[in-house]
Structure formats: structure tokens, C-alpha cells
Amino acid sequence: MREVTATNGAAIQVEGLRYAYGDLEAVRGIDFDVQPGEILGFLGPNGAGKSTTIKMLTGQLTPKAGVARVLGIDVSTDDPELQARIGVCFEEKNLYLNMSGKENLEFFASLFGIKDPDAEGVLRRVGLADRAKDRVKTYSKGMRQRMMISRAFINKPDVLFLDEPTDGLDPVTSAAIRKTIREEADRGAAVLLTTHDMFEADELSDRVAFINEGEIVALDTAENLKLKYGTRSVKVRLREGDSVRVETLPLDGDGSSAKLAELAASPDLLTIHTEEATLEQIFIQLTGRGLEG
Amino acid sequence: MSRPISRPAIIGALLKKELTAYSRDFIYLGLTLVVLIMFPVLFHILPDSVDETITIAVSPPVEVLVADARDAFIAMGATEEQLAQLDELDLTEAEEGLLLVEFEDKEQMARVVEGTLEAWETEAGDLVLSDTEAGDEKPKDAERVNLDIGIAFPASFIADVAASKSGVSVTVYSDAHVPAEIQGAMRSFVRELAYQFAGRELPVDFPEEEAVVLGQDRLGDQVTLRERMRPMILFMILLMETFSMASLISTEVLQRTVTAVLVTPAKVGDFLAAKTIFGTFMSMSQALIMLALIGGLTAQNWSLVLVVLLMGAIMFTGVALFVGSAGKDFMGQLFYAMLFTVPLLIPTFSVLLPGSVASWVRVLPSYPIVDVLVGSMVYGATWAESWGSLAYAAVWLVVLYVAGLMALKRKVETL
């Protein structure tokens, strides 16, 4: 890995970042950072400002206000060094359909000045080695998504921006893509991942930022968010005649331990399960809206 | 590993990709091949000479008319000198560039003019008629004689006219597509003959006529249709390439692959430079191939022709940049392509239909390109004679190219 020159060692450092499409303010002064080797999950519904943030950080949009540095480079300076060290996976599958997977990767590698790129090796990582010479227009949706991921990896980037990388994919393909993303982070790349899939954010992210209507409403590890905003509880199921009675006991409440002990000793006890809040429940609690909105 | 990459290297990589995309698209590739084959074939089919002779059919043959008139002239007491003049009668003296084809039977002549009977001239100069519809075979080593006008004289025409008989009737046959003014000219020709045979002067005093040919007098050296088509074909090549280029740009914009390119070290300027170079290269290379196939470059005009073709190629690339960025989908792109290319095509009609060009046609951006191409390739115009049109073309080139560049730049930056 090359040296990261941000003041606090962060690969991505954002302070007071703003962007507006005309009168519509899409991003309203957000602050966050991403360390090398860290995956930050940007969790929010459609239109929350996730993609606009990525567009600013990758130089596609110029921020209206605030400062954003990627690898110590101010994103508004249009420095080609920035683009040389980042990898981007777009939500839209913008591949050259009349070129093969290998040709797509070789073309993009040539734009980074990479001689003799290991296109087949990269395709092998995402399970596309056997289709390397086929034109992308013959690929399935899942294969095109894996192709998008492999394109983002072709220059061994120090920072990866992944916009909804598993959106609409089957569980097996999603799991395979998550595995390769984790490998990139383990290599030392900082990863900014946008998603509205709370399961993905929970499983893959080292930290999660909740973004809603252009603002970050919470940012912490998934565990801390659950501890901070969620309620730990136990769900107890008891036989009651011919039916089943369910009782939910908060673990942090007064007297809950005694009540739990009483129920656990009951001869009608069927099951006891611990329950913790999901990220989606916390998101709804914080914003009053769901992630699919 | 990646390393710092120069702008020329990035543009080179983009050009390589453009070439791959172009060669993979069977529509563009097919269109290019069809054009490169179809235009030269069409060019070589077109006549490479202009026949300045008017061929008309007459019946009966002149010698029959003369033989019949001879007896009448003797009876009228004609002198030996007058009889000798009659024997040397040449109907074609009445009109310059007139060639007569003589028929014994006026019904056959009428069928030839109508087109239901074919007339062929053998190498020996004999006229052979064949009815191919009835199964007659085409005569060997014979050339088809096209006759659109036929004049059927009565056998006693000369004698009757000379004797000032009234009610002499001559029938002029003409094919349906012969213009009315040609039919009228033939009727005048018959009247003139009648006066000539009657030994009278026409009852008018003709004014002194002086024909002044402005510009190069091309009598006997007319511009053939083939020569006229040469600059038009080259212009069409440039114009058709606009469609292909606009389509390539549109595809890149609509599929947003340009966005993926612009998050690499490639900048908008590199993208635009690559499109310009590729579009100009494709247009110019096809125009040069066409020039090789149909000819047209001479020691005098080559530099002027190549410069004006290059200007046209850049101008139409500018149009392609604009059209490619304007359409929101294939139909939209097609609409904008037609909107721009149809008006640009209009000046080429002045090549096919020479004459005065309407002033609004001269304003069109493509007019100076067509004007210089035609001038240099057909009429041998020099650099000195073409500066005005070249300067005008240069102004339009800058306007269209900058407009196309700005439109595409704005489009890719706002995707």
C-alpha cells in the first residue's frame, strides 16, 4: 500500500460536505472518515444522498461546500492522482457490452497505465474466468455485477467506492461478492459501501453510517448502534391450554431477571430466545422511515 | 501496477477502444462496407461522356424523299444546278449536332419511339430492329440506338412543299417523357425544312445573335454525370459517417460507460479528443479510400481537395458530437441526426441540378464544402479561387465543432 497523507491517517476524510441539485439539497453537511482497511457501510433508503456522496468523492460532482479528501487529495482539485488510486463500482452496470470481460478489464487497466494486467486473475476472483473471452452482452445480471466488481479491483485501488454492489442479486452471488470485498479490505483498501440492505451492512461493515435526507443521523459500529439504540430482550413462548402465549421481557428493565427466572421454571415453557434490535429497526427509530423507501 | 500515465497514452487507449467498438457493431460496419462498395459501382455505371448530338428518326429515308422530288422538280423545269443541289440534300444541315436514323416504315419507327421495338446499330452501320418482347434475340456486336423523336414525312413532302401545295401533313412522334419544349423544337425544325425546300427565306428578319459563354466554354467538353457525382459521393461519405459516429457517442452516453471512464485518470478532454480524432479519422480514411476507387485527384487539385475534405470531416464530427449528446434514446438520436443531416444534404442537389442556387442554400454550413469540392474536382478551381468558400467553411467548422464539443462536454459532466 502507498502512504496515506490525510491528517488523521484516514483514507477518506469528509467535513461539512454539501451538494444540491438546484433547490434540492441532496447532501447537507456530512462528516465522516474511513481508515485504511476499514469498510464503512452507508446505510440509507433511495434518495438519501448515498450516491451523491460517492459522486463527490470520486470527482464526478464538485461539492458545493465542505471539504473532502481522499488519500489526502482534495476531491475538488481534479487531481488525476486521485483517480489513479481509487476503484469505483457503480450501481448502474455501465460495461462495454460488445467487448469481452477480459477486454473490458484490459481497456480500463490501460487507462490506469497498467501494462500486462492480470485480467484473467481478477476475473477468476469473481468466478468469471471461464467466461473471460465472451462478450459482456451475453452475461447474466449476476455475472455483470461481478464484472463491475472486478473492474473496480483492476488497479489494486487504495480506496474502493462500491455503490449497491449486491443490489438485486441472489444470495449465493451476494455472498461471493461480499467475500471479495472483505478480501480487498484485508489487503488494506478503505471501502465505502453504500447499501440499503441492512443485513449486508451488518455483516460486512466495520462501521455503519445511517444517512437520511442528506444527513448522517448515526455513525458507529453495528454492535454499538444496537447497544445504544436497540433494546435487548428475551422472547418466551409458553403453552396455555391449546394455544401458545408469547412474552417479551426487556433484559435491561427493573425486575426482568426475576420474571425471567419465574417463566423459565414454568412447566408450560416451550422456548426462550434472546432478541436484539436490527439495524433497520434502529434506522426506523432514528428517522421514522424504513430503508426501502 | 499502475504508473503515471500521459494524456496521449490515455487518448491512445480510448482510440483503441473506439476502433474495437466500431468493428464489433455490425450495423456500422455493414453500412461502411455497403457505402464503400455501392458508391464506386454506381459511379462506374454512370455515363462518362456527354452526347451532344440529337438523334431523331425519320421516315421515309431521305433518298426516297429526294427520288420522289426529282421527278417533280424536272417537271417544274428545274435547272441542272438545282437538281444537283437536291441530290446533295442533307437534312441535318438545318440543325447543328443532328443525327438522323432512317426508317422505311413509319409504323416501325413509331414503335421504336414508343419503345415496343428496339433499334440496334451494327458495327457495319446497319440498323437492325428486334422485337425482344416477341422473342427476338439481341443482335450481336450491336449498340442500342435510343430514339425519342420520330418524324414521318409524306413521300412527296419535298415536291409538295416546293409546289406550295396546301394540306401537306407531317407527323412528329415523341416518347411520353420527351419535354414539351423539345417537341416544339422538332415542329419548328419541320417548318424550317419546309421553307428551305420551298426555296423561300423565312418571313422574318433575324436579329444579330452573339452567344457569349461566361466562364469556361465547355462546348464539346461537357461535364459528365460521372464527374458531377464524384464530389457528391465524397460529400455523402462524410455525411454518412456522421450517423455512425453519432450512434457510437449516443451509445456511450446512454449506457453511461463514459462515467466509468471518467473515474479513471482519463478526463473529459481526453474523451472529447478521442471522439474527435476517431470521427475525423473514420471520415477521412473512407473518403480517401473512395478517392482511390473513383479517382479525382490531380496534380493541380490534390491539396485543395484534401484540405476541404479534412474540414468537412471535422465539421461533421462536430455535428456527430452534438447529435450523439442530444438524443435520450435511439429514436431521439435518429431524430436529431435527421434534423441536422437533411439540411446539410441540400447543397448537394446543386451538383446534380446545376443552375442558380437559392441564396438560403448558400447560407447552409455544408454549401462551401460542396462548392469547393465541385469547383476543384470538376471545374479545376484553384486555391486563389476557393479562398472565400474556404474561409466561410472554416467559420462554420468552428461554430459546429465548438457547439458539438460543448454539448457533449455538458452531457457527460451531468450524467
Image (cartoon, coloured by chain):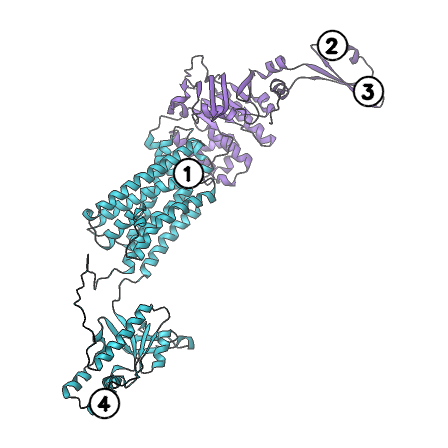
Chain colours: A purple, B cyan
Look at discs 1 and 4 and give the one toward the viewer.
4
Residue B72, disc: 4
Q: Earlier in the sequence, mark 1 or mark 4?
A: 4
Look at discs 3 and 1 and give the one toward the viewer.
1
Q: Is residue A211 above or below residue A261?
A: below
Mark 1 surroundings: few (<14), some (14-19) or many (≥20) residues within 10 A: many
| Disc 1 and disc 4 in contact, CB within 8 angstroms | no
Chain for disc number 2: A
Mark 3 surroundings: few (<14), some (14-19) or many (≥20) residues within 10 A: some
Q: Quadrant of the C terminus of chain B?
A: top left
**Tag 2 residue:** A256
Look at discs 3 and 4 and give the one toward the viewer.
4
Which amino acid, mark 2? Answer: Ser
Count of residue discs? 4
In the displayed structure image, the side of residue A245 where residue B286 appears, left or right: left
Cα–Cα gap, marks 3 and 4: 142 Å
Chain for disc number 1: B
Which element is circle 3 on?
Answer: strand
Cα–Cα gap, marks 1 and 4: 84 Å
Cα–Cα gap, marks 3 and 1: 69 Å
| Disc 2 and disc 4 in contact, CB within 8 angstroms | no
Task: Name the one closer to the observer, B294 or A204.
Answer: B294
Q: Is residue A30 above or below residue B13?
A: above
Q: Is residue B4 above or below residue B372?
A: above
Cα–Cα gap, marks 2 and 4: 146 Å
| Disc 2 and disc 3 in contact, CB within 8 angstroms | no
**Tag 1 residue:** B325
